[in-house]
Amino acid sequence: MKRALGTCYYPEHWPRELWAKDAQRMVKAGLTWVRIGEFAWKRVEPRPEMFDWEWLDEAIDVLGRAGLSVVLGTPTATPPRWMLDRHPDMLAVDAEGRQRGFGSRRHYCFSHDGYLDECRRIVTLFADRYGRSPHVAAWQTDNEYGCHDTVISYSSAASKAFRRWLRERYGTIESLNYAWGNVFWSMEYDSFDQIDLPILTVTEPNPAHSLAFRRFSSEQVARFNRAQVEIIRARSDAPISHNYMGRETAFDHFEVGRDLDIVTWDSYPLGFLEDRAGVTVATQRRYSRQGDPDFQAFHHDLYRSAGRGRWWVMEQQPGPVNWAPHNPAPLPGMVRLWTWEAFAHGAEAVCYFRWRQLPFAQEQLHSGLQRADLVDAPAMAEAEQVARELADAPDVAEAQAPVALIFDYDASWAWEIQPHGAELSYFDLVLDHYRALRRAGLSVDILPPTGDFDGYRMILAPGLMHMSDELKARLMACGAEVLIGPRAAARNEDFAILRPLPPAISGLDVLVSRVESLRPELTRSVSGGGSIWGYSEDLEGAAEVVLATTEGAPVAMRTGSVTYMGGWGDEELLDRLVSDLAERVGQGTRRLPEGVRVRETGTERFWFNHTDQPVNTEAGPIPPAGVLREPLG
């Protein structure tokens, strides 16, 4: 597989006389892909049923004749203002019951059938016109599902659709009442039509009700995306993609990914550092111009899995952005490092967002490969350097990692609904385990609970609040060294605690008898080093105790090759666990310097220095923000 570079371009923002010059400069820089069109509905259809295709025809032709392959986006993330006159109830409603407004983007509710029909109409027109274009080499549906908290909508359209969904799922209102435990607080319903959305209740809604609504909302995203994919696929042979986001868990990306040919995501390491990476202030200071060493890599591995191996970075940060709490410039070399890091994790393409900084509207302070005055920005030289390096680089040869880490969107919703502690989230729990694996120098594959476990030496499955009997049996029988917990199988699929008490895994003699959440300053020290913080469980059973508190209470217990972890380990404790599991299967680990990470492909080993100082490694010295590549074998 060849690796390629690209950019995101908006011809409608610039005079036509610039288009050919921009295309030539892109090619000179070594770019081969260009994404366009995803926000251009109003320019294509300025009035209902009145179209102006000529400018888009010309833009695609200019870019294609220059030698660029076009990714054409469907424009459904930004419906024109006239659309609201047609469908005034198409807007989403937030958790306070307020209708969201026009004036930015993503102003629609996924459950609104009228707007979905409008999307089918415009996507059909796009696909009919460009589906066989020699220059349109890929498609993107919509843009960034979930951005700006837009998956969950409490609109009347969502309410009607949710009731239909519940009726199909539960069959009878008696079954729903029983499954949800509605006998509590006299919450029993007499019909599905009585069920409102879990919003503005006096205190918290029934967690089963909330979880059902989260599942429904996720399925609405998949339904919306599938409608576009089916139209395009009937009219084009080009692969279809969608660009996911960082730390976006409101919908199941694996489910949406099953309908796509390529999964892409939008990587903004410096924006994410303070906005969503979940790191300490000290870490933010240390990596303020580099980004967290593990956050981007985690998403590379997650979305490689969601794309079944085919994935890109559709938007790569090239300089300061406009939307984070603070927006510094990258350390020199970081744009190159971020690009190579994506390729090391299997990306087919990395596209920089954006080609040129815009002098107007909401993203004026979002940098690009060029400044607003058409002069190259600092990132251009780094992109050109990567393009030259790619010319001499071997093709990507993917290889299965020795470790699998399970990520489950349903578990994320369950933790959000019932976190039990103010600082606790499923995403952070999984990311902490990923960080520990990376600190040990291990390459990681991230899998859904339904993934294929064959060939992995270690499988980590923290925080899976609901585990099917089938998943429990597969983990017990897979032959890998398995780590599960905390909060494993703590609830059934309708958010109830069952008997026997969790985790109730046949062959693993462990029982969780009590759970507690801990204040941040109150930790439980573990004998031999490390601590439990945030969340702790009391464990019983005849399984072997492999970790215990300094007072002797079990922290981790093991039967055969399956270990149950009864708490949230700090960095030292998770490092101990990973080292122990790796040693049991003969998997080599490394003690990497601070900020250094390793990733192996089938033919190469990549070393990344995320620090602002030179670092010596076993493979040789690496400069600040540097990349070192070495062949394997």
Image (cartoon, helix red, strand yellow):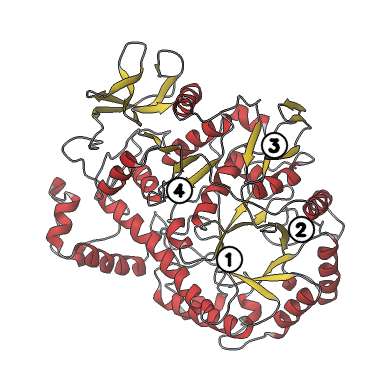
Q: Position of residue 274 (x, y in %)?
A: 60, 39
Look at mark 1 in the image and give the residue it sits on. Answer: 103
Percent x, y for residue 488? 31, 37
User: Badge 4, how many Cα within 10 Å: few under 14, some, many 20+?
Assistant: many
Which residue position holds label 3?
Answer: 608
Q: Quadrant of residue 169?
A: bottom left
Could you tell me which residue is drawn at 62 percent across and 77 percent down? 42
Q: Earlier in the sequence, mark 4 or mark 1?
A: 1
Disc with the residue nearer the chain's start (1 vs 3): 1
Closer mark to the observer between disc 4 and disc 1: 4
The residue drawn where x is 20% and y is 34% is: 501
Q: Amino acid at mark 1?
A: Gly
Circle number at residue 359 = none
Question: Looking at the image, which residue is at 36% across and 27% down?
Answer: 567
Which of 470/611 is in front? Answer: 470
Marks 4 and 2 sit apart, C-alpha to C-alpha, by 37 Å
**Nearer the camera: disc 4 or disc 2:** 4
Q: Quadrant of the C terminus?
A: top right
Looking at the image, which is closer to me, 231 or 448?
Answer: 448
Query: Could you say which disc has been placed on residue 357 in the image?
Result: 2
Q: Earlier in the sequence, mark 4 or mark 2?
A: 2
Q: Amino acid at mark 4?
A: Leu
- In space, the residues marked 3 and 2 are separated at their CA atoms by 28 Å
Q: Amino acid at mark 2?
A: Gln
Is residue 451 at least partly visible in the picture?
A: yes
Q: Which badge, 4 or 3, comes first in the chain's sequence? A: 4
Pointer 3: residues within 10 angstroms few (<14), some, or many (20+)? Answer: many
Categorize mark 2 by other alpha carbons within 10 Å: few (<14), some (14-19), many (20+).
Answer: many
Which label sits in the foreground, 3 or 2?
A: 3
